[in-house]
Image (cartoon, rainbow, N blue to C red):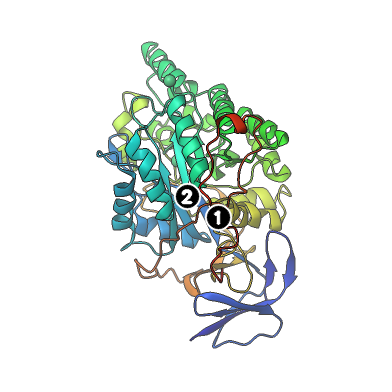
Amino acid sequence: MTTKVIKNGTVCTADRTWKADVLIEDEKIKQIGVDLKGDETIDAEGAYVIPGGIDPHTHLEMPFMGTTAAETFETGTWAAACGGTTMLVDFCLPGADGSIKNAIEEWHRKSAPQICSDIGYHMAVTGWNETIFNEMKDAVDMGVNSFKHFMAYKGALMIEDDEMFASFKRCRELGALPMVHAENGDLVADMQQEMLSKGITGPEGHAYSRPPEFEGEAANRAITIADAAGVPLYIVHVSCEQAHEAIRRARQKGMRVYGEPLAQFLTLDEGEYFNTDWDHAARRVMSPPFRNKEHQDSLWAGLQAGSLQVVATDHAAFSTEQKRMGVDDFTKIPNGSNGLEERMPVLWTRGVETGRLTPNEFVAVTSTNVAKILNIYPKKGAIVEGADADIVVWDPKITKTISASNHHSILDYNVFEGFEVTANSRYTISRGEVIWAWGQNSQPQPGRGRFVPRPAFPSAHEALSKWKALTAPKMIERDPLNIPAGI
Ligand code: DUC
Ligand code: ZN
Ligand code: ZN
Ligand code: ZN
């Protein structure tokens, strides 16, 4: 048994801020109090002691658009740790055989020897048949309780409305959370062809062919389908007011609809796609695309008001060379941008330093809300006795200039290049082990990270749909008192 004590810091959680020491015993938080003693001391003078960040949305080593995302599970989890993120939730995609179960096993094979910190998975549902119906249960039993549906990427990952409805009803039965990539894929595909036919082949065509109206329409449609199925809904990478407005309206009606803006969408705008340097613009091509300032203001307002609950990155890293696959045709540029290491420093600098978010709100949207929505709270996302000791000593006095020359991602560029940030992790602690110390730069042992299974939601986790009685299947019975001991 080894103990460590984090001393002289200010503990900051989603709901309060107070001076206290935190005692860690092996992998867990043992005690929070004053004048605690341990075998080792971690100094938090002048810093906040916060729950480790959780990025709910990444694509590491994902095969996509004719190539494979360059960020590995090793470099991705390491880069995350350097910026205060101790857990990420990655998207599993079915392979050629279409099997969900095999995809999860494949993700384990790839990730297990590499991960420097803990991970979870979401599973993509990209079609509909009896095998998928059956294997969704296997996925839940394997600790994957959320299923993503792509409403875009026609001819590849896109799912039709009837299939999505069937999958959402299956989610309800299983106590799982459906997620959507909300963009109208039919309209996007049409607009892409229109741009190309007009000779618009550069990255600006990407922005033109994916307007916010297409995202808003799909968000509304997904909400209607979730309402009819009687399930909650999580809308990934919310980029615009139209999608945010749909979420606000649904929540006002009493539905559990969650919205996830990205650090990129809060701080980078569509002007990037009109940069005359093709590489610069193409490196920022992701879907949905960056929007203008009014949309950014809407997203910040949503984080303040609680109509948007979490901040992610959608980290999908493709090198400049990979981006150049689309040099003559923007529809062939692999979609994705980076942010795992930058999410928390950028959000602090542009959110807390500007007065848009309180430190407690920062903790909520980077960690605690994620853990609650994805059903791993308070094992993760909390500073309470018995929780995993995933803790960050967050130093609001560290300044740095974000750059590909000093980041820890495998990428040869950084979409936040040149951003001055005024905070960073001084120490990142993952299950009791210091895996990052500012100024030391020594990477932890790959493979020390673990997969964190996320259990099915209890039966009370359902939307308040007025149609539910007509359409929704019964949830699989669970004993509400059959809860394992401990966190
Ligand atoms: N959007 C991206 O930009 N990349 C990965 C998948 C997605 O939906
Ligand atoms: Zn269609
Ligand atoms: Zn997506
Ligand atoms: Zn994504």
Q: Residues within 10 Å of mark 2 (few under 14, many from 20)?
A: many
Q: Residue at x 51, y 52 (%)?
A: 456
Residue labelled with disc 1 = 375
Labelled disc at residue 145 = 2
Q: Quadrant of the C terminus?
A: bottom right
Q: Residue at x 38, y 50 (%)?
A: 138
Q: Earlier in the sequence, mark 2 or mark 1?
A: 2
Q: Residue at x 37, y 11 (%)?
A: 197
Q: Quadrant of residue 240?
A: top right
Q: Is residue 408 visible?
A: no
Q: Position of residue 35 (x, y in %)?
A: 69, 85
Q: Which one is nearer the viewer's eye here, 52 or 120?
A: 120
Q: Position of residue 59 (x, y in %)?
A: 40, 46
Disc 1 on helix, strand or loop? loop
Q: Residues within 10 Å of mark 1 (few under 14, many from 20)?
A: many
Label 2 residue near ligand 4, CB within 8 Å = no
